[in-house]
Image (cartoon, rainbow, N blue to C red):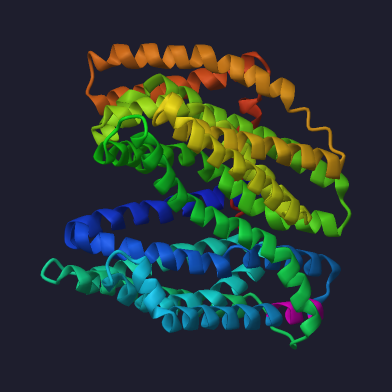
């Protein structure tokens, strides 16, 4: 099997480039399109994303898993037929969703606070059809372990979208014209991406077989729980947006104050917590076909090693961010947003990154091993606790209730996922002793980071202070992890060096 280390590194690099280009794109939008145009587009885009989730959430993952199994067993005909059924199903589903939007125009118009948002949603509908083809073929390449094609197509779509949007938008246009152009740029980008994916699919010897209806049932059975979980997740955010401000108003805050605090918590603080999941998300992407192949080969030893090491990896990577957020959260909030509340909330929320990372990696394992239904049940249980906490805790903790509710949700889901993995795979995870060691080490590391950052703040500019504080936190984490034998970073460094070391060129004999 291909080196997991190289795969994770490749996915991480492209993920960083894609997110960086997206960040630059948002800066361009804020300057050229204006607040009203961006607002109109975001409202329509949020509805579009729910529709896209129906098509592109569970289905690509299941295609990846099934393709991996077919490749191992060399069932080329079954692989081609399964792919053909998947393509037809997603294409029909996308067309049905488009018709629903057009037929129930009045319903969608009432949902939007501004009727102009419906025009923008219509401009995004072609992207839905193109994505139905795009996601299936990417899922097939994902299952075959073709991560380069997987990463390139995603990055390519982002670049095309930016270029087309920049050419179409302009400060001289009205808000609705710019918003519509953003919608059409998304559809054009998806068209170009679909064409590239088709070319790459056939370039790498991809084949589409005969339609056989018996492959539809397993596709629906396995992808539906994942799709429902992702769709439900897309509805959770709007519900939180309704509950939290309303509950804050019951304890004396005005509507403006409640919305402002909610905006700081969800719009500024929580996105920073998800930075830690970038590396873990790359590992999750790489693990799906890897574990699927191992399961098809009944290689339980490989599965056991992957589970133990990746859980450990997720725990350690998540823990690296805790002292950074806890020790200098206020400085980060002021530097990024010029808002001290966001920094204070970041300090309070730093612990969430650990259950968040474990939830991310364990969900990937459960989906890879065929336990997507149980994973969905665990998600629902966590969501129930989330909404109970959001309803009752604001009267006690105020806006910090959002943090506690999210932390409770991720903690319960992570624990349930780990217990399920242990029961189904019979793997001795042995994560508890390491977990408590890591937690104990975070106390002195956070204290040292806070001390160094506070001291540097009297001498250096804020940006330099944050850089020094982050460096001290990272180095102290590595040193203490080695001292207490939690993780051998020296071995990792040597492994990475050997993997990427250039081979000496052999001169031809003359």
231 or 259, nearer to the observer: 259
Which sits in the foreground, 317 or 94?
Answer: 94
Q: Is residue 82 magenta?
A: yes
Residue sitting at the far bottom: 210
The answer to whether residue 502 is above or below residue 227 is above
Which quadrant of the figure contains the N terminus?
bottom right
Where on the picture, by quarter, is residue 59? bottom right
Whether residue 159 sits left or right of residue 444 in the image: it is left
Residue 471, x across and y down, in percent: 42, 24
The residue range painted magenta reads 77-83
Q: Residue 189, how many percent across, how many down?
A: 39, 73
Instruction: Looking at the picture, tell me which residue is in the foreground, 475 or 507.
Output: 475
Quadrant of residue 330 in the image? top left
In the rendered view of the protein, which quadrant contains the C terminus? bottom right
**Outermost residue toward the left in this view:** 172
Report the side of 431 relative to 122 (left or right). right
Residue 186 visible in the picture: no
Residue 392 located within the stretch drawn in magenta? no
Q: Kindly identify the residue that appears in the image at 44 percent across and 74 percent down.
A: 190
Labels in figure, total: 0
| Most foreground residue, 416 or 293 | 416
Q: What's the residue at 48%, 75% (across, down)?
A: 128
Q: Residue at x 39, y 72 (%)?
A: 108
Q: Is residue 423 above or below residue 395?
A: below
Q: Residue 54 appears at what percent x and percent y?
A: 56, 67
- The answer to whether any part of residue 232 appears in the image is yes
Q: Quadrant of residue 468?
A: top left
What is the x, y in percent for residue 22? Answer: 36, 56
The residue under the point 61% across, 74% down is 137
Q: In the picture shown, does residue 123 fall above or below 17?
A: below
User: What secondary structure characterizes most of the magenta part?
Assistant: helix
């Amino acid at each position: 099997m291909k080196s997991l280390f190289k795969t994770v590194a490749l996915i991480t690099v492209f993920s960083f480039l894609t997110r960086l280009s997206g960040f630059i794109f948002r800066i361009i939008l804020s300057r050229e399109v204006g607040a009203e145009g961006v607002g109109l587009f975001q409202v329509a885009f949020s509805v579009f994303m729910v529709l896209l989730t129906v098509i592109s959430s569970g289905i690509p993952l299941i295609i990846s898993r099934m393709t991996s199994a077919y490749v191992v067993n060399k069932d080329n005909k079954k692989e081609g037929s399964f792919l053909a059924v998947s393509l037809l199903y997603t294409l029909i589903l996308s067309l049905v969703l488009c018709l629903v939007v057009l037929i129930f125009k009045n319903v969608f118009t009432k949902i939007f606070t501004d009727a102009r948002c419906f025009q923008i949603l219509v401009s995004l509908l072609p992207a839905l059809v193109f994505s139905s083809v795009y996601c299936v073929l990417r899922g097939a390449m994902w299952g075959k372990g073709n991560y380069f094609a997987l990463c390139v197509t995603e990055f390519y779509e982002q670049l095309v979208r930016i270029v087309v949007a920049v050419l179409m938008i302009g400060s001289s246009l009205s808000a609705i014209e710019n918003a519509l152009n953003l919608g059409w740029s998304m559809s054009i980008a998806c068209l170009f991406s679909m064409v590239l994916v088709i070319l790459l699919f056939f370039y790498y010897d991809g084949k589409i077989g005969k339609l056989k209806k018996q492959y539809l049932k397993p596709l629906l059975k396995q992808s539906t729980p994942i799709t429902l979980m992702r769709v439900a997740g897309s509805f959770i955010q709007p519900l939180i947006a309704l509950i939290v401000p309303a509950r804050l108003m019951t304890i004396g805050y005005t509507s403006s104050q409640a919305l402002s605090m909610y905006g700081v918590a969800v719009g500024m603080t929580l996105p920073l917590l998800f930075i830690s999941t970038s590396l873990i998300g790359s590992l999750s992407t790489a693990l799906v076909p890897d574990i699927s192949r191992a399961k098809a080969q009944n290689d339980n030893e490989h599965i056991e090693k992957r589970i133990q090491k990746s859980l450990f990896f997720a725990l350690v990577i998540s823990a690296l961010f805790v002292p950074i957020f806890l020790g200098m959260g206020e400085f980060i909030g002021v530097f990024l947003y010029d808002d001290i509340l966001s920094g204070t909330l970041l300090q309070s929320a730093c612990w969430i990154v650990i259950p968040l990372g474990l939830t991310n990696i364990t969900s990937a394992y459960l989906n890879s091993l065929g336990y997507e239904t149980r994973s969905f049940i665990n998600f629902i249980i966590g969501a129930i606790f989330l909404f109970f906490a959001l309803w009752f805790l604001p009267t006690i903790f105020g806006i910090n209730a959002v943090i506690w509710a999210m932390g409770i949700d991720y903690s319960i889901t992570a624990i349930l996922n780990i217990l399920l993995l242990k029961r189904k795979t019979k793997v001795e995870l042995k994560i508890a002793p390491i977990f408590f060691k890591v937690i104990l080490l975070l106390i002195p590391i956070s204290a040292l980071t806070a001390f160094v950052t506070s001291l540097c703040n009297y001498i250096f500019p804020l940006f330099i202070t944050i850089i020094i504080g982050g460096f001290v936190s990272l180095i102290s984490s590595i040193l203490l992890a080695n001292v207490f034998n939690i993780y051998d970073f020296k071995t990792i460094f040597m492994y990475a060096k050997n993997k990427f070391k250039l081979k000496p060129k052999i001169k031809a004999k003359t």
